[in-house]
Image (spheres, rainbow, N blue to C red):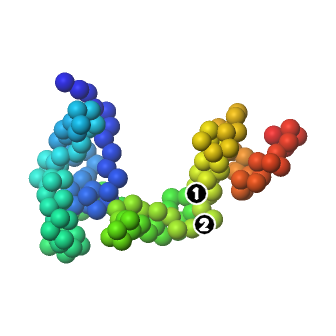
Amino acid sequence: MTNVSRVSLHNWQLVEYLGLTEGCHIILRKAGEIIPEFVKCVETGRTKDNYRMLIDLKKEPGSWWDNHPAPENAIRAPKVCPFCGAELVRVATQDGADGAALVCPSETCRSKIVAKMIKFVDRKCMNLMGIGDSLVDLLHTVGVLNNPTDFYKLDVKTL
């Protein structure tokens, strides 16, 4: 027996199809012997497998939702970026199909800028030791870092 403290759903269409609400009861199973996989929402009776079947049959998810609306208090996908307020867009998959990921299209989004700089200092990129996520965030907040080239302008006095 395993105690599961968290399970993630990254596909907003699936979340909306299942009709998940805060505090609802869900059934999980072990996927690959370890990873908790979402199976079913007890309150709505909707399952992940039924969702996959809709997609495999190439039925438009929107048309299904129109005829089978989720509960009023269902968890809904965000419409705008929580950091910059830009309207979120769905990213298409490699084969051109509608994707499930919601992304901020704004190149001036604070969160995206900080994430790019954190990736830049990472061990797999420039390996700038002693500079962690929180320091990058702080230096951007105070206006010292706005792009990766600003790392090369840092001096002791600025820090």
SS state under label 2: loop
Q: How many marks?
A: 2
Pick the front one: 7 or 92: 92
Question: At x 86% / y 38%, what residue is drawn?
Answer: 156
Outermost right residue: 157
Label 1 vs label 2: CA separation?
A: 7 Å
**Dot 2: few (<14), some (14–19), or many (≥20) neighbours within 10 Å?**
few
* Residue 42 picture location, percent across and down: 14, 47
User: Do labels 1 and 2 touch, CB within 8 Å?
Assistant: yes
Pick the front one: 6 or 97: 97
* Residue 69 picture location, percent across and down: 18, 67
Q: Give the number of the disc on residue 107.
A: 2
Residue 154, picture quadrant: top right
**Dot 1: few (<14), some (14–19), or many (≥20) neighbours within 10 Å?**
some
Give the answer, above or below, for where 145 lies relative to 133: below
Q: Give the number of the disc on residue 76.
A: none
SS state under label 1: helix
User: Would you say residue 25 is visible in this rendering?
Assistant: no
Residue 3 falls left or right of residue 149: left
The residue that disc 1 covers is 112
Question: At x 21% / y 73%, what residue is drawn?
Answer: 60
Name the residue type under label 1. Lys
Question: At x 18% / y 53%, what residue is drawn?
Answer: 48
* Residue 75 picture location, percent across and down: 30, 56
Name the residue type under label 2. Glu
The C terminus, quarter of image: top right
Of pointers 1 and 2, the one earlier in the residue sequence: 2
Question: At x 57% / y 67%, what residue is drawn?
Answer: 106
